[in-house]
Image: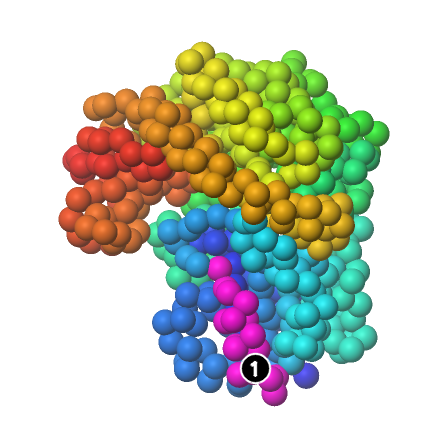
Amino acid sequence: MVKKIVILDGYTDEPAGLGVPPYIGTYPRLIAGAAWLVDKSIDVRYYTIDMVRADVGKFVKGALESDIIFFISGAEVPGRYIGGKPITLDELERLSMLLSEKTRVLVGPAARYGFGMGGGSTAYSRRRLKRLFDYIVPGDIEIFVYEGLKHGLEKAEPWRLREDYKLADEAFRLGAKIITQHPNYGWNLMVEIETFRGCPRYVTGGCSFCIEPRYGCVIFRSVEGIVREVEALYKFGARHFRLGKQPDILAYMAKDTGKLEFPAPNPEALRKLFHGVRSVAPRLKVLHIDNVNPGTIAHNPKESREALKTIIEYHTPGDVAALGIETFDPKVVKMNNLKVYPDEAVTAIRIINELGSRRGWNGLPELLPGINLLYGLPGETRETYRINFEYLKKLMDEGMMFRRINIRKVTVLENTPLWSHRDTVMHLIRKHDMLYRAHRKRVMEEIDQPMMRRLVPPNTIVRYLFTEAYIEGYTVARQPASYPIVFKIRGRLELRKIVNVRPIRYLAKSIVAEVVE
């Protein structure tokens, strides 16, 4: 009989979900909730990898007293983080070996698509991870935990994927309590809320590099299921939420999903969802979204406008619609079955700016696009870099605003179409390395830095920032948000405090600011 479970959160970052502090992802809540569905008396202890680094002896001692240890891992999308550092392969191996006498289970994206090794690399294959764990769960973790605790782990089916959200909804609701063990609880904790699973573009195969279409048929969570989870989280003290864990919030409950590559948005369903969240969490401080497919906007401008207006009506300012444009080079778009051609991407950016550029109570525009550009994809040439920069400059000259440009090298993941072309991709990345570095530097200097001034003009007061860390003589402060701007305040302010700031100098990826009352 299982009496104690330990969850080690090595953090996750995948195309449709984030679990790096200040975020808590979906996996810890599903594990804890499924366990408590079986037996409410099970002792579930939650640790982040940063907590383990701070006192590895304490963690190992507690873990050795448990019956099962769940390792959550999978930073499949390369990123840079202030709030925490995802678990490394060396750490995963070392901790697994230290706990070899216990039952060890690997869950998260690494269990399904391999261990991401960062941008410009090939994932560490799941086959090579098998020696470290008793079970690797490529399926949905709530099914494995629920069936395993009821009937024995050896009888559970780790590959099983959910056909609906019935079990997951209950696990999410019961697992809400686990947030109280997170180190960011009580200050800037952001809770990632899953809205649906899979990508509507699975009908045409989806983007070559992406894991989301590999789940197959899209499954939506009901409004009721999401709202009940938010209600439970709110009762446990959560005040910052992101409706994410999906590749396109505008596709939520879209009626032609499974028939069309770009189904028209369902504004009424989005209204019910956002209104429901507001009803059960009336004093929330942040309500943001994550991904938006620019193709949905370009193919369905009327319905997309209504959907975006609905989001803006209910959300909080400083929100970002992350657009997976990936490239403005038509050749690369075609070879990798990407979402939009250049002019379609520009249309989506213009529409979001038109509706979301008004400044809100916290000093930032209501809703802006974020642009993701990906390098190393088949078909890329030196010309790709020129085309991408020219489109960014064109948008800049038009007066458009975008919260950030995310320039990164592709990570080749197992079970994606790109996996069979990984040698070609690695060759491209090595060949264009110097060009990539020069391009990234030019974008930072000529686009990012002036864009910061446009986003936060001089004398703008930006409100509700949390002091988080000390870096190179500055105190770093950020809002809880989808993609928060980094503000640097000279000197060492007390951490975990809320401040308001005014910009005094603009950098490419941050703003130097002063505190105002």
Q: Secondary structure at mark 1?
A: helix
Indicate the position of residue 343 as horizontal and vertical percent values: 62, 16
Task: Bin the neighbour count of mark 1 within 10 Å (Cα to Cα): few under 14, some 14-19, many 20 and up.
Answer: some
Q: Nearer the viewer, residue 417 or 267?
A: 417
What stretch of residues is rendered in magenta?
86-102
Above or below 68: residue 397: above
Tell me the residue that label 1 is attached to: 97
Q: Where's residue 341, x and y in %? A: 66, 22
Which residue does the image show at 28% across and 39% down from the upper left? Answer: 487
Against 351, residue 118 (above or below) is below
Question: Is 95 contained in the magenta span?
Answer: yes
Q: From the image, which quarter does the N terminus lie in?
A: bottom right
Image quarter where the C terminus lies is: top left
Badge 1 amino acid: Met
Between 484 and 129, the residue placed more toward the observer is 129
To which quarter of the image does residue 96 belong?
bottom right
Residue 463 visible, this orientation: no
Image point (72%, 61%), residue name: 138
